[in-house]
Amino acid sequence: MTALQTMDGRDAAYREENSLTSVVSYPQRCSLWGDGRYPGNCDGRLFKNLVLRYGAKVVADPMMGSGTTRDVVEGLNRHLGSDITFWGNDLRHGFNLLNEDLPGPFDFVWLHPPYWNIVRYNEGNPADLSNLDDYAKFRAALEVCVLRCACALITGGRLAVLIGDVRRRGQYTSIMRDVLALEEHIGELRSVVIKAQHNCRSDRKSYGKMEDLPIKHEYCLIFKKR
Ligand SMILES: C[S@@+](CC[C@H](N)C(=O)[O-])C[C@H]1O[C@@H](n2cnc3c(N)ncnc32)[C@H](O)[C@@H]1O
């Protein structure tokens, strides 16, 4: 019997979703991975599906927050008998992606940075991207982080950047566009996944009088290194 044939309910969470497309929506967060109370945490299913789809064996997440990606890989290794090596870190554990290299090379890097200053992570720490209120400074710092991740990839390796756009006081700022603009320095853009956003703090706001549409999605931009 293969590992897949012997799966119980919990193991089934580690199966690859064959129906994965460029639109994903996970209304209920999967509680197996990371910490749902950590601000800005993400559901682990998109990451899991990408790791399985690309057959990634050496994986990194330099802004892992509550450890969602670490837990997914640990589970894949335990429940599917995979042998995936994972390196994860975060500013909250003392790793600063602005000036420290990843201990690569990796074949898959997942980057889930702050969406500008929407959620403050490490209060008062100037190295935290979420403390850069000036958008030009934030964008420059994000570029450094994205390019550092790209440098840590093998040729043919994948970089997935999960990012959302921001509207503040009526002004729309497309962080996604600024990451896409880095394509030629990273490699080739291969997929853009639209991920519906659920359970955001902004869900409690009333949008009755807004001229423009509330943002209810984020993007996962997937690049392949040349
Ligand atoms: C959107 S959160 C990641 C959440 C994570 N995916 C999860 O599910 O818990 C962004 C993370 O970036 C980290 N961060 C901000 N600036 C950083 C830097 N310069 N170097 C490393 N990590 C940084 C923050 O501490 C925060 O944990």
Image (spheres, grey):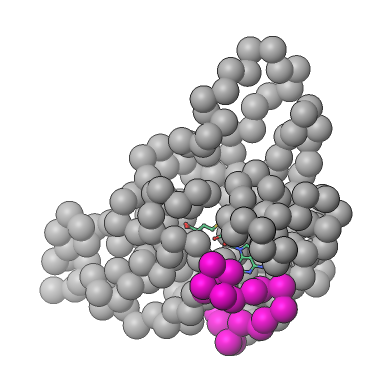
Q: Residue 192: tell me if it is visible.
A: no
Residue 124: image quadrant is bottom right
| Furthest-top residue in this view | 209
Q: Position of residue 208 (x, y in %)?
A: 63, 12
The residue at the point 30 percent across, 76 percent down is 77
Residue 153: image quadrant is bottom right
Q: Position of residue 126 (x, y in %)?
A: 72, 63
Q: Is residue 114 left or right of residue 52?
A: right
Q: In the rendered structure, which segment of residues is drawn in magenta?
A: 89-107
- Residue 139 colored magenta? no
The residue at the point 46 percent across, 41 percent down is 25
The image quadrant where one finds the C terminus is bottom right
Q: Residue 9: tell me if it is visible.
A: yes
Q: Is residue 178 above or below residue 144?
A: above
- Residue 97 colored magenta? yes
Quadrant of the displayed image that contains ligand 1: bottom right
Q: Is residue 139 left or right of residue 166?
A: right
